[in-house]
Amino acid sequence: MDADILFRQPGPAHLLFQLGQRYADSALDDIVFIIIVAFFLCVALTIFSVRRYRDLAHETKARAIAEGEARDLTRQDPLTGLPNRRLFNEKLDACLGLARDTHQVAVLLLGLDGFKMIKDKHGHAAEDKALCEFANRVAEILQKDGVLARIGGDEFGIVLPGISSLETPTNLARRIVASASETFATETGAAELGVAIGIAIAPTDGINLHGLVRRAERALYRAQGDGRSHVRFFEPEMDMHVDRRIQIERELRSAIKADIIEPHYQPIVSLKENCIIGFEALARWENRTWGRIPPDVFSRP
């Protein structure tokens, strides 16, 4: 009590008391100010962090969507929306890993006949429309677990997994041929298409992706050679035929360089005038291995 009276009395003690009181009030104000500033900094930092997290999440989602679209573009045909050759190979490779004698995989390669005629007669727009229409027709026929892809300009591929009988790809091929035989409507008139189909079966014809596709291609080539809208299964003799063809082409190049191919001249006779009016030049090739090879064999495109 005496000390309190002493500090309140005018004099040095009272002056020191007032200075101390002011310092204490100033320190308290600084502490309160620091606390308020820290609080607002925490709030601002929290708001910034939430906004930044939201922006990063949006950017990550947009990047994931863009990457997904880019992957789709590398695996899809832009015109028909079907899988392209890359995705076709991936799907086929996955199915071949499960191929068994009782769980076979069929590969069907489809080549359109008359496609170039549509382009020449009706234009590129009609060509694209016919392609899309054909793809839609085949997609409607195909079973759910089958894969349809556009693997070339006028070529399509189908993977049929889990078949137990050759009747399944045979019936599908027949239905595709029948569907393609119906006219295609274009802006400049009706157009007609045919389709040749080559079929290879795994594991009977192989379980290697590229080997199986190559054999389906050889069956397709034979089907196209048979005429419009034919279907052929791969046969082992097709490999022999192709190998012979490759060997003939290889030896033909050597024969041309060595000037072995001889011209034979056949007279052209006018029955009206009863005289020779010209000559037809025919190529003749005598090969050491194959003997005499007809021109329609070594000159076939």
Image (cartoon, rainbow, N blue to C red):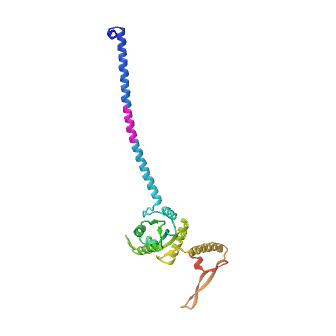
Residue closer to the observer: 144 or 218: 144
Q: Can residue 60 be spotted in the picture?
A: yes
- In the picture, which quadrant includes the C terminus? bottom right
Residue 233 in the image: x percent, y percent?
51, 74
Q: Is residue 257 left or right of residue 187?
A: right
Q: Is residue 39 above or below residue 126?
A: above
Tell me where residue 254 sits by quadrant: bottom right
User: Residue at position x 40%, y 44% from top?
Assistant: 55
Q: Is residue 89 left or right of residue 37?
A: right
User: Residue at position x 50%, y 72% from top?
Assistant: 199
Q: Is residue 89 above or below residue 27?
A: below
Callout count: 0
Residue 146 in the image: x percent, y percent?
44, 66
Residue 272 in the image: x percent, y percent?
53, 91
Farthest front residue? 102
- In the picture, which quadrant includes the N terminus? top left
User: Residue at position x 41%, y 43% from top?
Assistant: 53
Tell me where residue 80 sits by quadrant: bottom left
Tell me where residue 276 sits by quadrant: bottom right
Magenta stretch prevailing secondary structure: helix
Q: Is residue 294 above or below residue 71?
A: below
User: Residue at position x 38%, y 34% from top?
Assistant: 42
Q: Can residue 159 be spotted in the picture?
A: no
Q: Which residues are magenta?
A: 39-51
Residue closer to the observer: 6 or 57: 6
